[in-house]
Image: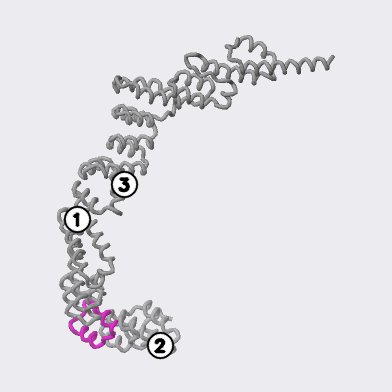
């Protein structure tokens, strides 16, 4: 008996499979209730049964005479549901395609987008505003649909106003901005790009508008949008100096034009020809003079104006020096270096001219000349210079320069002239003259200083005895 029950069950399942297979290949309208009743009791076949019911409902829908697609189940399986939906929308059967997509759980965006594009093409007599309401009523059913693609279709059909209204509903700026630019809505495109904060989109809009618009129109458009303006300035500083100067001039930013001119002069100075007494110095000087004029027109940049004026003056003098000396070593050096180089070359008249032209202070002048004369080891000139008048820097710099040049004998000429006994003692100590250093230190009557000085002669026994001799006068020294 158990065997017969199992055999009966197997035969029933086989019969159901044959029935479902036959039903699928039949073109007659199924009696769905009866078919469902046959398979209701079989849990094993329920999934297959439900799938067959779905398939038959789809096939019956497209076989209907108003649709006219008499597919067999085998053809349907080979064709697949997405392809069938594609054929339906190409046949303008959008409602059936939408219902089938919804029934099978497929993406409805393709159907709605095709319907929207077809509606735009066919609705020649409907106004843009009315057609927009019709489209939005259906498009809102599908979240994430590309309004940009539909707007592009509207533009291709000559309905640019409708395209502009549709693109307003596109949530993705990356889709909005390119289309807005293509339909001539440059101002809106730039606004959307800046609102998105995406610098790539802003640059895309900037370059497009830059190429199509007149300069003043372009400047006015970006001036009202800080992000677009700043990105334009950043790009132009690297690649479009002339255009950036026009922008600054149009907005009254004269100081920024001046800075650009000054920078151009430095860039020109990097040219190898500019360091060989070439005519390139003339354009450099002209650029700096233009910068100075622009700085002078603004009350807030008095310092920059004066600096530019002196820079041009110095550059002109350095160029003349290079021509006269035939040595390309002056241009772009500082005032101090220029004076020092002139003295080293023996051109004292030129050095004095630079001093007077740029109002170099006496202290600075003495420092520069002392070390320049020591550099060329012109000891007679140095001594003569020290006797012209009492040096405003004192004699200590003369001593230091001679010691640094390892000329202790020359340093000894100036040490006795140092008025401050503390400095005189330190100078004697530097050249190893312990007795003289001790005598000078004793004049300070500073036991702490004398103690420090003694430590510098720790290896000198005679110097130590000299310090011991002074112990009675300075009890604090041990």
**Looking at the image, residue 307 lies above or below residue 84:** below
- Stretch of the chain drawn in magenta: 366-394
The residue identified by callout 2 is 463
Q: Is residue 441 visible?
A: no
Please report contact status of discs 3 and 2: CB closer than 8 Å, yes or no.
no
Magenta residue check for 53: no
Where residue 231 is drawn, which disc sits there? 3
Label 1 CA crowd tier, 10 Å (few <14, some 14–19, many 20+): some
Q: Quadrant of residue 198?
A: top left
Write the residue at 27% across / 52% down. 240
The residue identified by callout 1 is 301
Answer left or right for 166 relative to 455: left
Give the image location of residue 130, x and y in percent.
Answer: 31, 20
Question: From the image, which quarter does the C terminus lie in?
Answer: bottom left
User: Camera-side residue: 266 or 119?
Assistant: 119
Of label 1 and label 3, which has the lower sequence position? 3
Label 3 CA crowd tier, 10 Å (few <14, some 14–19, many 20+): some
Please report contact status of discs 1 and 3: CB closer than 8 Å, yes or no.
no
User: Camera-side residue: 91 or 109?
Assistant: 91
Where residue 388 is drawn, which disc sits there? none
């Amino acid at each position: 008996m158990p065997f017969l029950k199992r055999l009966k069950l197997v035969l029933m399942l086989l019969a159901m499979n044959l029935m479902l297979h036959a039903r699928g290949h039949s073109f007659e309208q199924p009696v769905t209730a009866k078919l469902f009743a046959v398979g209701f009791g079989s849990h094993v076949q329920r999934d297959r049964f439900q799938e067959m019911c779905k398939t038959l409902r789809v096939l019956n829908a497209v076989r209907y005479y108003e649709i006219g697609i008499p597919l067999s189940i085998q053809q349907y399986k080979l064709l697949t549901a997405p392809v069938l939906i594609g054929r339906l929308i190409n046949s303008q059967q959008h409602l059936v395609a939408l219902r089938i997509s919804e029934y099978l759980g497929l993406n409805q965006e393709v159907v709605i987008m095709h319907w929207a594009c077809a509606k735009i093409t066919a609705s020649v007599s409907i106004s843009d505003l009315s057609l927009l309401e019709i489209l939005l009523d259906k498009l809102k059913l599908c979240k994430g649909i590309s309004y940009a693609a539909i707007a592009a279709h509207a533009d291709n059909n000559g309905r640019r106003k409708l395209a502009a209204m549709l693109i307003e509903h596109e949530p993705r700026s990356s889709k909005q901005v390119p289309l807005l630019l293509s339909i001539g809505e440059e101002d809106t495109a730039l606004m959307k790009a800046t609102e998105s904060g995406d610098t790539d989109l802003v640059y895309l809009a900037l370059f497009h508008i830059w190429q199509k618009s007149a300069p003043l129109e372009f400047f006015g458009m970006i001036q009202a949008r800080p992000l677009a303006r700043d990105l334009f300035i950043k790009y132009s500083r690297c690649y479009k100096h002339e255009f950036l100067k026009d922008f600054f001039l149009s907005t009254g930013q004269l100081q920024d034009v001046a800075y650009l001119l000054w920078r151009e002069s430095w860039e020109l100075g990097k040219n190898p020809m500019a360091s060989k007494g070439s005519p390139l110095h003339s354009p450099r000087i002209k650029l700096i003079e233009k910068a100075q004029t622009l700085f002078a027109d603004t009350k807030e940049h008095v310092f920059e104006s004066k600096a530019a004026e002196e820079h041009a003056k110095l550059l002109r003098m350095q160029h003349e020096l290079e021509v006269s000396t035939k040595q390309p070593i002056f241009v772009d050096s500082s005032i101090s270096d220029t004076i020092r180089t002139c003295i080293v070359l023996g051109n004292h008249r030129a050095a004095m001219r630079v001093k007077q032209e740029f109002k170099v202070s006496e202290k600075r002048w003495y420092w520069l000349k002392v070390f320049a004369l020591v550099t060329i080891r012109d000891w007679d000139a140095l001594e003569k210079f020290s006797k012209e008048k009492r040096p405003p820097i004192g004699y200590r710099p003369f001593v230091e320069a001679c010691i640094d040049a390892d000329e202790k004998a020359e340093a000894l000429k100036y040490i006795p002239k140092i008025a401050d006994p503390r400095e005189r003692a330190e100078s004697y100590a530097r050249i190893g003259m312990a007795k003289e250093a001790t005598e000078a230190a004793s004049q300070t009557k500073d036991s702490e200083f004398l103690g420090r000085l003694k430590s510098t002669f720790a290896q000198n026994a005679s110097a130590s005895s000299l310090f011991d001799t002074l112990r009675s006068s300075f009890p604090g020294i041990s």
